Image (cartoon, coloured by chain):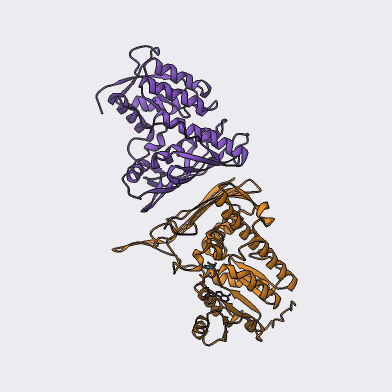
Chain colours: A orange, B purple
Amino acid sequence: MARHSVIDDTGPLGVVIVGAGFIADHHGAALRASSRARLAGIVDVDAGRASAAATAAGGVPWTTDLAEALARPGVDAAIVCTPNMTHEPIAQQIAAAGKHLLMEKPLTITVPSARAVVEAFDAAGTVVMAAHTHRFYDYARAVDDAIAGGAVGRPVFARLALLGGWIWPDWRAWVLDPAKSGGHALHNGVHLLDLVSWWLRDEPVSVYARGRAQTAAELRIYDYLEMHVEYAGGADAVCEMSRGHRPSTLDRRDVLVAGTDGVLQLPADGWGSTVVTESGTSLLHPQAANGFAVQLDAWLDAIADRAAERAMTPADAVRAVALGVATELSIERGEPVTLDEVMEGVRS
Amino acid sequence: MSDATLGVLLLGFAGLGPDQDHQRAMYQPAFEAHPGFEIVDAALDDPAVDVVSVCVEPERRADAVIAALQAGKHVLVDKPLALTAADAAKVATVAAETGKVCLPAHHQRFHPMIAAARGAVAGGKVGLPWNVQADFLVAGGTPSPAGELANFAVYPLDVVLALTGLRARRVFARLGTHWSDGDADDFALLLLTHENGLTSTISVGRTRSLADTRPAGLAVHRYRVSGSHGVLDIDASRPAVVLRRAEASSQVWHGPGTVDRLLDELHAAVTAGRPSSPSAADAVHIAEIVDAARASAASGHPVDLSTEKEGSR
Ligand SMILES: NC(=O)c1ccc[n+]([C@@H]2O[C@H](COP(=O)([O-])OP(=O)(O)OC[C@H]3O[C@@H](n4cnc5c(N)ncnc54)[C@H](O)[C@@H]3O)[C@@H](O)[C@H]2O)c1
């Protein structure tokens, strides 16, 4: 039964973090810096990780049982940082408990399950947002500001490349198992697919993608993805997501947007400073806003005012999943795949 | 370079559309400036003519090149060498039979940044190449009535093929008209799969004019070659001395331009009695890709190239 949580307008929102792994630290730091929300507990199936994270956070409650955490007084919401294949059941449990959710991307790894999650939160009357964090980074906002301001007219062609070295900490991690992560398109590809679709303000209609296991023949995911998206308004986008580029010390971002009235570029050498030392060349990132903190605020804004325009809607989250699924399917088939097809839930 | 001065006949002053005349705009001044050539005013069969520079209308171009080759002359031919792969193949066959040089004017591969990059890739600097990304966006000038797939795409296609040495096997393409008023495409996106599993993506188009880019100048011209052992970023807007002044900014560099270097290759191939690089066979493969791109854009599906006709490289 869906229950509606009663949020005390005067105090900060109580948030539990579910999944105390790599990305949870970033959300924890954002929570610590916020006066609008507070960390109300940690949940992890691994008791050691849960307790360690809880201790590090100053002794907040921890548990291995999500239901127990959600039932605790003062818990209004959850930020879920667990492996992708666990997102659907955890999201459903949180919706059923009547809590708000910031779900790490992807919302889920299939279109039907993503839709079901959105419907469950609609029914519960609580907020669900997928953490497409790139939307909240300065570089992405700078591009978006320019496009929104009409700098290039109507954008007709966009390129976005994120090329970096290996970031996965463990070669045995779930991320490398397509059954658990959904594949690299759903794991990291969705960042770019979502960002470009947001920039272009247009609806994707089909995806033609190529994938490559570049780093090692034994990889079961494509560490290099080349994804072409066609949009309803006639625009094209090319997104490259790569963990196959070397060296890992140079993480390169490249943006090109051509519009009816101009061209916008964030060249790979145009952001950050290069540091050349005896041990090689690396990139020094510019000082920037904490994207996780900006994202947290956007989520808290959505919770505080349900009528307000959302920085990232549930429909956007479903669309990102659909784009990721279409990418994986297109690579498999060697043919373009329409969003209509995957929205019908062919792969459910 | 040998001392031999070659007599050049300028044949035709036409191009794709009424405004295009590369003969007067590009080749004639380059021939005039080049110490190895002398423009002669003579008939095609005149022994004073060693080389014919062909810029006749595209519809008649292949026939004109064939006639020149059969008259025993070497040929520099404006791009595109022919409007279809079938016509280009006829030219290549005659070029091979006559043993004469037939150099398609794919001069961007002689750009100093690109020429150096070709050497670096061939020398193994990035290891085994597995991907190339290219952007070739021109700003302003007169849109080609034949479309920019027919007009401009030849250049970045030639560069990608020259950089990698790997022929295309599969073509997926999108064509759009975003900037010009006519029906002709002014934007093409080419997603190619090559031999060895290399993939490439090439954007090519002509936007409206932009400040600080001369009319019909390149606003974005770059290539990224990713290989097993490294990445090579080629920005063909460099090398450049950047001049910033009150009225506008501009860039300058010293040394021969890409068309001058194209003529160096023409002269070297003729005097050495060897085929030119690029050759007519290279133009055939590019025409095949352009044909396939058109078919792919129309159908919305990738198009496989036949592997029967192997051009020599
Ligand atoms: N927004 C971003 O930029 C970004 C970056 C990296 C990862 N992510 C996303 O964050 C999520 C987590 O990734 P990560 O790299 O932190 O993973 P991780 O493997 O480092 O951590 C996952 C944690 O979840 C725990 N866990 C597993 N199943 C659980 C369950 N059913 N209930 C509770 N805990 C469970 C594990 O014990 C582990 O501690 C993924 O969805 C990933 O896609 C997002």
Looking at the figure, which quarter contains the N terminus of chain A? bottom right
Front residue of B98/A33: it is B98
- Image coords of residue B239 (percent x, y): 36, 45
Front residue of B307/B10: it is B307
Above or below: residue A105 compared with residue B89: below
- Image coords of residue B112 (percent x, y): 35, 41
Seen at 69% across and 63% down, the residue is A115
Front residue of A61/B134: it is A61
Give the left or right position of residue A318, taking residue B53 as reference: right
Give the left or right position of residue A298, taking residue B128 as reference: right
Task: Name the residue furthest left.
Answer: B3
Above or below: residue A175 compared with residue A264: below
For residue A177, say whether it is visible: yes
For residue A313, say whether it is visible: no
Seen at 57% across and 70% down, the residue is A294
- Image coords of residue A249 (percent x, y): 39, 63
Give the left or right position of residue B110, taking residue A262 as reference: left
Seen at 65% across and 86% down, the residue is A72
Ligand 1 placement by image quarter: bottom right
Front residue of B126/B38: it is B126
